[in-house]
Amino acid sequence: MESFIQQVINGLQLGLMYALIALGYTMVYGTIGLINFAHGDVFMIGAFVGYLGYSSWGLPWPVAIIVSMAVCAALGVIIERIAYRPLRYAPKIAALISAIGVSFFLEYGSSLKFIFGPDYRVVQRPFRSITWNLGGVSITNIQVVIMAVVIIFLLFLLFLVFKTKIGAAMRTVSFDHDAARLMGVDVDKTISFTFAIGSALAAVGGVLYAIAYPQIYPFMGIMPGLKAFTAAVLGGIGQIPGAVLGSLIMGQVETMTAAYISSQLRDAIAFAILILVLLIRPSGILGRSQQEKI
């Protein structure tokens, strides 16, 4: 029983980090109907900036997270303005190809020696790891910090989206761009803000991921980004609660598979569950089916 509870805690840690990335996917898709495949690479850049912040620039690690959020928020706005806004009303395939191109640009650009370099870096954690044994279950201060930080940012996002004026604008734009303009909403500004918030959350996830699994490299965002996208689709892309639920499920499935079946099958089983859910409920667990006029 203790072993099972241990794996549940490990899966919760992983799932909450996926949630920070999945929220960016679901917010952008809910606002403009675009899958931002460069989002995993924004996560990678957030990890590097945060790591450099507390290891090379001498910043306290909470300040390093804030700096990483600011850098990635600005990067998200730049990506939206240059790569996506000119294609907003173009065929969806054009925006998709642009997203893939931005992803490759960030990955290979970050690999240049005068930026981050192509090599793996071992992350020196900003604080000493402490382990507590509670009834046979091991809990570390790293897990506690990660869970606390993620929950704080999730609550902040819910407050922002459902209790503020800019949140109301985001929900209006996600429903209908033209109606939002008629109501006086600055659609371009709102979409840019959505990219900024999603990218900032990805930066938090990147820094926490680097602390929990202390190794970073320019292509580290591919698999977490893909799994977070899978989690968003699993929960119901476009729905904030769905992104969180899908991420928690994904974290538990991966952890339980590695612990009780085989670590080599963790990815295959996670994606197989996605396929199964989509066959039964294509809109995802919490998604709503929508009719489109033709």
Image: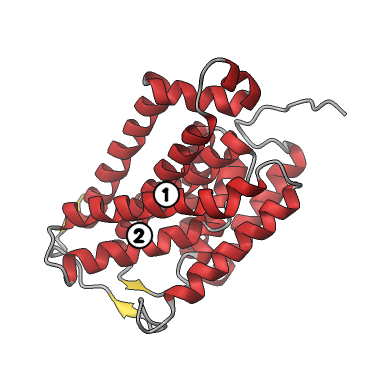
Q: Quadrant of residue 290?
A: top right
Residue 96: x and y in percent read 68, 54
Numbered disc 1: secondary structure = helix
Point out the tag, 1 or 2, that comes first from the N-terminus: 2
Task: Report the residue at 56% width, 44% height from top.
Answer: 232
The amino acid marked with disc number 2 is Gly
Q: Residue at x 73, y 38 (%)?
A: 282
Query: Is 117 rendered above or below residue 234?
Result: below
Q: Tag 2's secondary structure?
A: helix
In the image, residue 89 above or below residue 70:
above
Which residue in the protein does label 2 denote?
46
Is 119 in front, or is 72?
A: 72
| Contact flag, marks 1 and 2 (Cβ < 8 Å) | yes
* Residue sitting at x 57%, y 34%: 31
- Of the pair 70 and 4, the residue shown nearer to us: 70
Quarter of the figure with residue 45: bottom left
Q: Amino acid at mark 1?
A: Ser
Q: Residues within 10 Å of mark 1 (few under 14, many from 20)?
A: many
Q: How is the image coloured?
A: secondary structure
What residue sits 41% from the left and 64% below the top? 44
Q: At which x and y percent is residue 288?
A: 67, 27
Q: What numbered label is drawn on residue 199?
A: 1
